[in-house]
Image: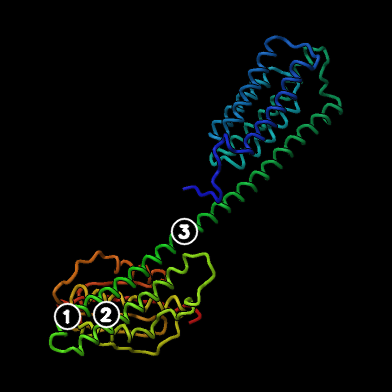
C-alpha cells in the first residue's frame, strides 16, 4: 500500500503539472523545432521528418511519465533515438532531456533503474558520435582523431555528460528518500490512528460491558430482594448508581481525547489501576459472585498503561464470570514476580447467562501483547468444569 501525506490532485487541477507542460513545451519548441527549421543548416527531408517525429514522440513520453513512469521513459527513449538518428545538431535540448531523465529514473522508477541509466548514457554517446560524424561527412569537414583539440573537446563533452547524469541521479535518489520518509511518516501516523481507535474500542467495551453487567445483576437481585429485604434493594440501587457514575466518568475521560479543545477539569481524574482491583472484587460480590482475591509477592509500581491493563484484565474476567456463569465461586490471583505480574481468574461452572462475542478475550490478548506478555484461557485447574483466564504483564525496564 502506498501512503501520501497530501493527496495528489487530479492532473487537470495540478498547477505544477501545467507549469511542467509549459516549460517542456517552450523548450521543445524553442530548442527543438527552432533549431530544426530555423538554424540555417540545409537538412535533408528525411532528417526533418525524423527530427519532427522524434520530438513529438519524446514530448508525449514526458507527459506519459506522470501516469505510467516506466512506459513513459521507454517512449522518451524511443523519441530521442529517432531524433538522434536524424543527425540534427540540437545538443542543448538533448542535454536537458538526458539530465531530466536521469533524475526521473532515479526518483520515480522502482525496477530496472540501472538498465535505464545504462541505456541513457549509451544513447547519449551514440547521438553525439553519430551527429558529429554524419555532419562532418556531409559538410566536408573532416574529423582528425589525431589532434589534441579533438580529444580535449570530446573529453570535456563526455565528462560534462557523465557529471550531469551523476548529479541528477544523486538528486533523484535524495528526492526518493525524502518521499519515502514522508510516506513512512504518513504510514506511522495512520498506524497510530488505527491503534488509538482500537484502544478506544477496547476501553469502551470494557467500561460498558462491565458496568452494564453489574447494573443488570444488581437490578435483578434488587427486584427479588425488595419483596423481603428493602435494605438489600436500596443497597442494590446504590450500587447501580455508583457504577453508573463511575462508567460515565470513565467514558467522559476516554472520549475527551477525541476533542481538539483544551482538556477539561474532568481530565484530572485518576486512571484506574491495580489499586482499584479490590473495588472490582467488591462489586462482583455485591452482584452475587462468591469471589476471593489473593495477592502474592511484592507489588511493583507500574506505569500508567500497565496499571490500567491489569485493572481491565481483572474487570473483563469478572464481567465474563457474571455474564456466562452467574453467581458462582471465583478466585482472582495477582502474582507479583521479579519481572512480571501474572493475573489469573478462575470460576466454577455455572449456567450460561449471556452468549458472548469473544471481543473481551481478544481485547485481553491485545492488551498484554502491547507489553510483550501473553494471555491464555481454557479449563480451570481450581474448579473442575470451570473456566480460567491467565495473563502476564511484563514490567517496564524502569519498573
Nearer to me, 24 or 167: 24
Residue at 62%, 51% (x, y): give it. 178
Q: CA distance from mark 3 to mark 2?
A: 32 Å
Residue 178 position (above or below residue 332): above
Furthest toward the top, the residue is 45
Q: Which residue is mark 3?
A: 191
Residue 96 position (above or below residue 318): above
Q: Position of residue 149 (x, y in %)?
A: 86, 27
Quarter where residue 317 is shown: bottom left
Nearer to me, 373 or 318: 318
Name the element at disc 1. helix
Sequence-wise, which precedes: disc 3 or disc 2? 3
Drawn side of residue 34 relative to residue 252, left or right? right
Mark 2, residues whose alpha carbon is within 10 Å: few (<14), some, or many (≥20)?
many
Dot in front, 1 or 3: 1
Sequence-wise, which precedes: disc 2 or disc 1? 1
Sequence-wise, which precedes: disc 1 or disc 3? 3
Q: Which residue is mark 1?
A: 223
Mark 1, residues whose alpha carbon is within 10 Å: few (<14), some, or many (≥20)?
some
Residue 164 position (above or below residue 208): above
Q: Which residue is mark 2?
A: 345
Amino acid at each position: 500500500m502506498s501512503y501520501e501525506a497530501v493527496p495528489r490532485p487530479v492532473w487537470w487541477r495540478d498547477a505544477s503539472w501545467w507549469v511542467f507542460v509549459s516549460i517542456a513545451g517552450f523548450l521543445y519548441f524553442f530548442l527543438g523545432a527552432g533549431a530544426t527549421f530555423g538554424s540555417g543548416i540545409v537538412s535533408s527531408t528525411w532528417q526533418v521528418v525524423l527530427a519532427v517525429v522524434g520530438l513529438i514522440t519524446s514530448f508525449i513520453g514526458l507527459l506519459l511519465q506522470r501516469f505510467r513512469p516506466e512506459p513513459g521513459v521507454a517512449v522518451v527513449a524511443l523519441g530521442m533515438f529517432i531524433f538522434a538518428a536524424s543527425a540534427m545538431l540540437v545538443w542543448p535540448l538533448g542535454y536537458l532531456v538526458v539530465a531530466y531523465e536521469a533524475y526521473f529514473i532515479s526518483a520515480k522508477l522502482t525496477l530496472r533503474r540501472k538498465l535505464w541509466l545504462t541505456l541513457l548514457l549509451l544513447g547519449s554517446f551514440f547521438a553525439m558520435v553519430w551527429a558529429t560524424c554524419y555532419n562532418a561527412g556531409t559538410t566536408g569537414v573532416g574529423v582528425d582523431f589525431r589532434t589534441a583539440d579533438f580529444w580535449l573537446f570530446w573529453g570535456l563533452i563526455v565528462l560534462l555528460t557523465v557529471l550531469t547524469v551523476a548529479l541528477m541521479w544523486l538528486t533523484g535518489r535524495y528526492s526518493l528518500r525524502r518521499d519515502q520518509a514522508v510516506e513512512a511518516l504518513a504510514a506511522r501516523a495512520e498506524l497510530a490512528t488505527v491503534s488509538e481507535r482500537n484502544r478506544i474500542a477496547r476501553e469502551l467495551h470494557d467500561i460498558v460491558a462491565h458496568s452494564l453487567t453489574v447494573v443488570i445483576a444488581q437490578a435483578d437481585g434488587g427486584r427479588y430482594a425488595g419483596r423481603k429485604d428493602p435494605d438489600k434493594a436500596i443497597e442494590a440501587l446504590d450500587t447501580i448508581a455508583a457504577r453508573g457514575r463511575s462508567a460515565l466518568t470513565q467514558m467522559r475521560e476516554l472520549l475527551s481525547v477525541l476533542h481538539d479543545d483544551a482538556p477539561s477539569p474532568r481530565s484530572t481524574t485518576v486512571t484506574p489501576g491495580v489499586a482499584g482491583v479490590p473495588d472490582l472484587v467488591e462489586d462482583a460480590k455485591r452482584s452475587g459472585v462468591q469471589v476471593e482475591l489473593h495477592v502474592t509477592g511484592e507489588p511493583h509500581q507500574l506505569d500508567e498503561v500497565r496499571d490500567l491493563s491489569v485493572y481491565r484484565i481483572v474487570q473483563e474476567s469478572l464481567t465474563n464470570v457474571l455474564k456466562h456463569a452467574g453467581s458462582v465461586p471465583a478466585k482472582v490471583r495477582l502474582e507479583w514476580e521479579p519481572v512480571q505480574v501474572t493475573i489469573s481468574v478462575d470460576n466454577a461452572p455455572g449456567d450460561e447467562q449471556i452468549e458472548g462475542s469473544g471481543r473481551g478475550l481478544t481485547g485481553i490478548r491485545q492488551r498484554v501483547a502491547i507489553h510483550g506478555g501473553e494471555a491464555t484461557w481454557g479449563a480451570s485447574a481450581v474448579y473442575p468444569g470451570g473456566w480460567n483466564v491467565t495473563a502476564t504483564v511484563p514490567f517496564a525496564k524502569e519498573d
